Amino acid sequence: MANKHTIILMQTSPNRATRTFMDYDSISQAMDGICGLYERKLKELNPAIRNITYDIADLYNFIDGLADMSALVSRDTSP
């Protein structure tokens, strides 16, 4: 899964102005980027809490709460 250029397309709310993208060199970096996005949101919502923990269900709920998220992954077509 390494070296597969990945672009994450995201819209955080129904407002089209919230559309954005994130660009990564690999699928694993993209997944880390999504986790980091969630962690930054948690820190923003809980500025007084030093150590915030979450589980995978919390991350899935965050992603499900977005208006849209898609991933474009490059495919090596060389023989």
Image (cartoon, rainbow, N blue to C red):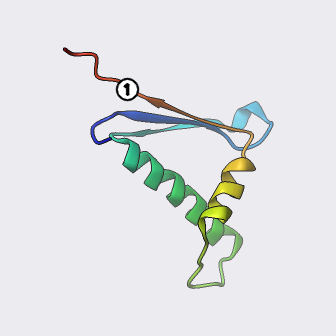
Q: Is residue 35 above or below residue 28?
A: below
Q: Is residue 19 above or below residue 63?
A: above
Residue 13 in the image, given as x and y percentages of width and height: 77, 42
- Name the quadrant of the C terminus: top left
Q: Residue furthest left?
A: 79
Q: Is residue 1 left or right of residue 73?
A: left
Q: Residue at x 38, y 49 (%)?
A: 29
Q: Residue at x 37, y 26 (%)?
A: 74
Q: Amino acid at mark 1?
A: Ser
Q: Residue at x 60, y 63 (%)?
A: 56
Q: Which residue is mark 1?
A: 74
Which is nearer the eye, 73 or 19? 73
In the picture, residue 51 is in which quadrant? bottom right
- Name the quadrant of the N terminus: top left
Residue 64 in the image, given as x and y percentages of width and height: 72, 48
Q: Residue at x 28, y 22 (%)?
A: 76
> Element type at marker 1?
loop
Residue 24 in the image, given as x and y percentages of width and height: 38, 41
Q: Is residue 19 left or right of residue 2?
A: right
Q: Is residue 69 left or right of residue 31?
A: right
Residue 72 in the image, given as x and y percentages of width and height: 48, 29
Q: Residue furthest front?
A: 79
In the picture, residue 19 is in which quadrant? top right
Pointer 1 local density, CA inside 10 Å: few below 14, some 14–19, many at least 20: some
**Count of numbered marks:** 1
Q: Is residue 65 above or below residue 50?
A: above
Q: Residue furthest right?
A: 14
Which is nearer the eye, 52 or 50? 52
In the picture, residue 54 is in which quadrant? bottom right
